[in-house]
Structure formats: C-alpha cells, structure tokens
Image (cartoon, grey):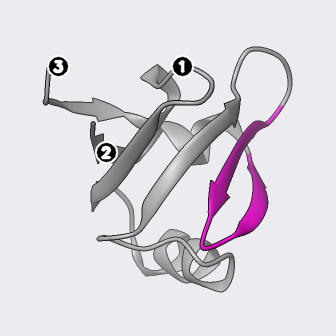
Amino acid sequence: MNMRIHRLTELKPEEWGRIVAIEGGRGLRQKLLLRGISEGTTIRMISCYHGPVVVEANRSIVALGRGMAQKIKVWR
C-alpha cells in the first residue's frame, strides 16, 4: 500500500484517508469545520467524478465543491 499525501480529489471511490492539511484561510476552515471536516478527520470518498465531491466524514455524507476539495490534503 502506497501511503502518501494526496489531494482529496485524487482518492478513488471507497478509499479512506486522513486529513493532514487544509490549504486555505479561516473562512474555508470554518466552512469545513461546520461540515465536520478538519485536520485529523478520517474520511471515505463516495463520489468524485461528476458534480460535487461527496465524502463520508464522522458518519455523515458531505458534498463539497471541487475547488474546496482540492485544498484538502489527505494521507491514504
């Protein structure tokens, strides 16, 4: 298994990752935190090919815009 840091959008459906960094300001971090997403959160990719990026985080399904999702770094 190749354990490296990737952008969230690089995960394939059903892959798991742990958020290690969010490349954005306070506003972006606050929006993500309100959705249950922060550094250290374990997430599972559900859908990333068409439309919004859909992930599972803390037993909730969350849809993110592609630009927002590309600013999230994960370790898989």
Quarter of the image where the N terminus is located: top left
Crowding at label 1, few (<14), some or many (≥20) Cα neighbours within 10 Å? some
Prevailing secondary structure class for the magenta stretch in the rendered image: strand
Q: In this view, does 26 lie above or below 56?
A: below
| Relative image position of residue 31 (x, y in whole percent) | 63, 76
Would you say 19 lies left or right of 13 here? left
In this rendering, the label closer to the viewer, 1 or 2: 1
Q: Is residue 54 magenta?
A: yes
- Tell me what residue is drawn at x 28 percent, y 30 percent: 6
Mark on residue 12? 1
Please, which residue is most extreme toward the front here? 1
User: In the figure, residue 58 lies in which quadrant?
Assistant: bottom right
Q: Secondary structure under badge 2? A: strand
In the rendered structure, which segment of residues is drawn in magenta? Answer: 52-64
Amino acid, disc 2: Lys
Which element is circle 1 on? loop
Q: Report the residue marked by disc 2.
A: 73
Residue 19 point in image, percent of width and height: 33, 57
Residue shown at 31% from the left, 44% from the top: 74
Q: Give percent across and percent down for residue 48.
A: 69, 24
Residue 17 belongs to the span the image colors magenta: no
Image quadrant holding the C terminus, namely: top left
Task: Residue at 74% x, 14% y: name it.
Answer: 49
Q: Is residue 11 left or right of residue 17?
A: right
Mark 3 vs 2: CB contact within 8 A: no
Distance of label 3 from label 2 (alpha carbons): 18 Å
